[in-house]
Image: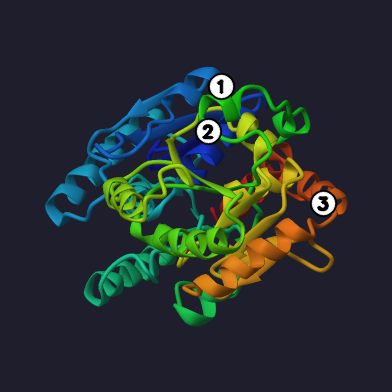
């Protein structure tokens, strides 16, 4: 079985991490050949090519797979992907992210690839663009769904939202396959010299947010809540781990409050185990999310989490699952949730067990192989 996996770019974030680990795991199966195709990262993004090299994942770089919509450029991209597919003749094309999903599925349709699968890691229909561009993306996804063999979502909530709220596809065409990650490194945590490296007090509680510094992640909410917590707990320190287009704005606000010793921006960190070995709490402040990798990793490391109640976050936190969810854009409730969690940390044992059971990378790979085989047999029966 030959699978062509297409993603817009390998920028630092949950999608690229998941795609690379998935490709690496699938490649261990002798009956599967995977061809990874992706574009280049943009100027303000971190690059995960280092992970591809570490995992032994080789790929085809198609510069035309840029993020922004451009009708003429996108037609050229479809043509280039079509030629690539005719050259490699995959049995399955599996796309990730909105732009790659659109051009990849239509190229596969034109190339007569029998099985066309797309994974929604989240969606861009809320909080990303203005009304006109959002409607354009909606129609692109609805049209692309018509030529898709199956659509995958990472959570039941996202499946319901795509089907019932945005009318992307009927529910019976959408399959839930939870995110899978290699979590083994988070079972062996050592504090190391992380606090010394970043000049953090040895005994200070640390609250961390991990992610791209872009509007949808709403770091302003993180800053506002941090200021409220600092008024009551001046011993607490805050970490912003990541980089992006809003870094200068965030740094300017930190300087305006004279919070340089209270809030630290580390930029991207390749090995997150020292972070999870030292932090007291991991948080999400986003306006929209799919299934946040940072929360899964934190729970696997036994770290309590607090998040805005958006997107697919709630599906992570089932019954008896240690976490606090707060409304979006409410710094007072977010700050109080942080204070409550620091004062009374939850027992994370059962949460860790469930995360390792449900979000393991091998479990994801097995589910994908099962789906690929089923869709392949269905196409053969039609022919």
**Above or below for 285 versus 20:** below
* Colouring chosen for the image of the structure: rainbow
Residue 349 pos. (x, y %): 86, 49
Provide the secondary structure element on which disc 2 rests. Answer: helix
Residue 124 pos. (x, y %): 39, 64
Cα–Cα gap, marks 2 and 1? 8 Å
Q: Identify the residue under disc 2.
A: 20
Whether residues under marks 2 and 3 lie with C-beta atoms below 8 angstroms apart, the answer is: no
- Give the class, few, some or many, for how many residues have Cα within 10 Å of label 1's Cα (few <14, many ≥20): some
| Residue 338 visible within the image | yes
- Give the class, few, some or many, for how many residues have Cα within 10 Å of label 2's Cα (few <14, many ≥20): many
Q: Farthest bottom residue? A: 164
Residue at the image point whose x is 71% and y is 29% from the top: 185
Residue 56 pos. (x, y %): 53, 18
Left or right of residue 119, residue 83 in this image: left
Q: Which mark is residue 348?
A: 3
């Amino acid at each position: 079985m030959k699978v062509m996996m297409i993603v817009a770019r390998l920028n630092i974030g949950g999608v690229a991490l998941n795609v690379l680990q998935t490709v690496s795991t699938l490649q261990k199966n002798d009956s599967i050949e995977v061809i990874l195709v992706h574009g280049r990262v943009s100027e303000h993004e971190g690059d995960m090519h280092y992970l591809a090299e570490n995992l032994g994942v080789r790929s085809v770089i198609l510069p035309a797979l840029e993020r922004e919509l451009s009708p003429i450029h996108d037609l050229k991209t479809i043509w280039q992907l079509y030629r690539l597919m005719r050259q490699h003749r995959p049995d399955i094309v599996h796309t990730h992210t909105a732009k790659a999903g659109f051009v990849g599925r239509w190229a596969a349709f034109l190339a007569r690839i029998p099985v066309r699968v797309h994974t929604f890691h989240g969606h861009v229909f809320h909080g990303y663009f203005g009304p006109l561009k959002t409607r354009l993306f909606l129609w692109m996804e609805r049209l692309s769904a018509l030529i898709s063999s199956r659509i995958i979502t990472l959570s039941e909530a996202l499946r319901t939202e795509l089907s019932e709220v945005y009318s992307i596809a009927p529910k019976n065409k959408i399959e839930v396959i939870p995110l899978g990650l290699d979590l083994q490194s988070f079972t062996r945590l050592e504090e190391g010299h992380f606090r010394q490296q970043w000049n953090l007090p040895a005994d200070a509680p640390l609250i961390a947010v991990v992610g791209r510094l872009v509007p949808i992640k709403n770091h302003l909410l993180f800053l506002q809540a941090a200021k409220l917590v600092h008024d009551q707990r001046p011993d607490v320190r805050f970490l912003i781990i990541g980089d992006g287009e809003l870094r200068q704005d965030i740094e300017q606000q930190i300087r305006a409050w004279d919070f340089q010793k209270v809030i630290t921006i580390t930029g991207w960190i390749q090995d997150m185990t020292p972070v999870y070995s030292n932090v007291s709490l991991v948080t999400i402040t986003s306006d929209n999310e799919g299934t946040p990798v940072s929360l899964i990793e934190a729970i696997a490391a036994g770290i309590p989490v607090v998040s805005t109640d958006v997107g697919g976050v709630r599906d992570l936190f089932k019954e008896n699952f240690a976490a606090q969810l707060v409304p979006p854009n409410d710094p007072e409730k977010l700050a109080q949730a942080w204070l409550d969690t620091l004062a009374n940390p939850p027992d994370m044992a059962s949460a860790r067990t469930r995360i390792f059971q449900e979000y393991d990378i091998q479990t994801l790979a097995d589910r994908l192989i099962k789906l690929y085989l089923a869709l392949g047999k269905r196409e053969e029966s039609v022919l």
